[in-house]
Image (cartoon, grey):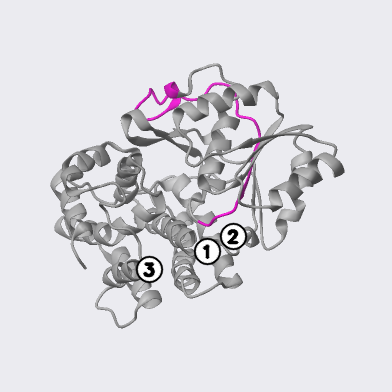
Amino acid sequence: MSIFGLTTPRQMLFGRDCRQQAAQHVAALGRRVLLVRGRSVAWVDTFAADLRDREGVAVTEVFSAGEPTLDFLREGLIHARQSAPDCVVAIGGGATLDYGKALAALIRSQDDPVVHLEVVGEGRPIGPDPLPFVALPTTSGTGAEATRNAVITVPEAAIKVSLRDARMVPQLAIVDPALTDGAPRGLTLATGLDAITQLIESYLSNRANPVTDALCQGAIPPAIAALARLMQGEDPAARDALARGSFLSGIALANVGLGIVHGLAAVIGGHGGAHGAICGRLLPAALEINRQAARDIGMDTARFDQVDNWLKAALDPQATSGTRALRRFIDDMGLEDLAALGCPADRFAETAEGALRASSTKANPVTLSAAQVIDLLDRTAAPA
């Protein structure tokens, strides 16, 4: 058996209302806290008040503004360093968590962030140790509360790239599914598809190991079923299952990587499309292309068959295949098409080339050619 390891947050809390313990845990990390937040979750105000009034902690609040760009990160670092925080807490969706994680990683550094970025920079390791980082997700999608990277958009290069370091894994992840209750249907769909794609790509990864296999096998079927249930109406148990799947997807991808879907999403997302929607739209064709490529080189396709059966069982037991059931599901739910997500047909060739250079693609279960990736895009764009 090959040598493998497992990187996870140093500590995690999971369960409804576990957010009520957040202030006391954060106060133990320092007396000056940088709180990175969005504006959509009212409980963040309660948390900040608890830190200030009950725990006697100085709190500096920073608001995120969508997916962090390189320039936004640079500006944020200037302001964050002025408050000299002892730790960083981020409460929000994946973009907010990534922004907070990047600030925690670079506050102590004097380098321009670009030198640490993949693809557009040097990918240089960060210097001083990051500040302690605490993540509380309010969506179930990216699993950023368990990952070792932060995704940064570089508009001038029309690409999303990662700031990556093993020391960036949060010191504490607090996952309270109640923070996702009532999330808009479209947001739930896109973020849920992201989590499911991450679980599936990690399970099929050429770096998969016995621990990540166990995590993914246990999480994929209930996550798919939970997303399908939430498209019918609000359900706390389904919110719990999807939050659990999202968290476990973060652990899995942090350890074994992803695949061509996320390689493509890094390129397509640079043109403005929602990441989770892009992943969900690409996943059916990616599974078909990868399975055929694996069969062509004599690789065992049992895992692909297993994933297909999971999709079929949860989405449409009468469908001829799980990938067709998934395609019909996302179409019925109104997910945007590939062109609307930023990838019209005239960009397929350059998108394919960019995806083959992306770091996520390195963990794809098989090596794909540019022609095969273009075929993947053609299938995705074709009418169902």
Q: From where the camera sits, is residue 343 visible?
A: yes
* Residue positioned 38% across, 30% down in the render: 118
User: Would you place residue 340 above or below residue 349 in this image?
Assistant: below
In the figure, is residue 283 to the left or right of 226? left
Residue 203 rendering spot, x and y as whole percentages: 39, 57
Q: Which residue is mark 1?
A: 242
Disc 3 to disc 2, C-alpha distance: 19 Å
Q: From where the camera sits, is residue 299 visible?
A: no
Residue 271 rendering spot, x and y as whole percentages: 32, 41
Q: Which residue is mark 2?
A: 180
Q: Is residue 27 magenta?
A: no
- Crowding at label 3, few (<14), some or many (≥20) Cα neighbours within 10 Å? some
Q: Earlier in the sequence, mark 2 or mark 1?
A: 2
Mark 2 touches mark 1? (CB < 8 Å) = yes
Q: Which residue is mark 3?
A: 333
* Residue positioned 16% across, 44% down in the render: 346
Residue 365 rendering spot, x and y as whole percentages: 29, 52
Q: Amino acid at mark 1?
A: Leu
Kindly state the secondary structure of the residue where label 3 is placed. loop
Q: Provide the residue span drawn in magenta.
A: 114-140
Q: Earlier in the sequence, mark 3 or mark 2?
A: 2
Kindly state the secondary structure of the residue where label 1 is placed. helix
Q: Earlier in the sequence, mark 1 or mark 3?
A: 1
In the figure, is residue 76 to the left or right of 380? right
Residue 141 is marked as: none
- Crowding at label 2, few (<14), some or many (≥20) Cα neighbours within 10 Å? many
Q: Quadrant of the C terminus?
A: bottom left
User: Would you place residue 303 above or below residue 372 in this image?
Assistant: below
Residue 358 rendering spot, x and y as whole percentages: 31, 38
Q: Amino acid at mark 2?
A: Thr
